Image (tube, rainbow, N blue to C red):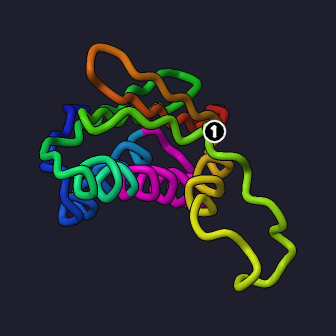
Amino acid sequence: MQALTVPANLDALEPIGQYVLEAATQAGLERKAAYRLRLAVDEVVTNIIVHGYNETGLEGDVVMRADLNADALTIIVEDTAQPFDPRVRPDPANLDRPLEERDIGGLGVFLAIKGVDGFDYEYADGYNRNSFVMHRPAQG
């Protein structure tokens, strides 16, 4: 699949979602797995756009790549916003408490990362790189 480059604004979420679903279809992912992958990518990319670009006054692009092998589909998201590793936030505490008693923020990314089979982050050469992995169903 060809890479997708879109401007880092919220209008980009629709083509990004379509890209992820097309990659999931090519990988033969089940509907629920494709949904979880799209949700995870959408959550992290929304944070990149809002917090990494908009709130800091930066402009740039989000670049998507889909890597497919016999075992897994990996969606790689790259951006030049401020470095941020989504894994550094502590897991939301007190999930059993009522909403009004919990801290704001972090739940969406927490749930997104838990919904995929693998997640990795690195910052290198001026780029944030978020990688989302979903295992392909056994062929047989």
- Residue 67 vs residue 96, the one in the foreground: 96
60 sits left or right of 14 in the view: left
User: Residue at left 61%, top 47%?
Assistant: 113
Mark 1 crowd level (few <14, some 14–19, many ≥20, 10 Å Cα)? some
Residue on which disc 1 sits = 137
Q: Quadrant of residue 123?
A: top left
Check the picture and name the quadrant holding the N terminus. top left
44 sits left or right of 106 in the view: left
101 sits left or right of 5 in the view: right
Query: What residue range appears in magenta?
Result: 27-46
- Residue 108 vs residue 88, the one in the foreground: 88
User: Residue at left 29%, top 49%?
Assistant: 19
Q: Quadrant of residue 84?
A: top left
Say which element carries label 1.
loop
Give the residue at the far top of this rendering.
125
6 sits left or right of 103 in the view: left
Check the picture and name the quadrant holding the C terminus. top right
Q: Position of residue 35 (x, y in %)?
A: 52, 60
Q: Is residue 93 above or below residue 56?
A: below
Q: Amino acid at mark 1?
A: Pro
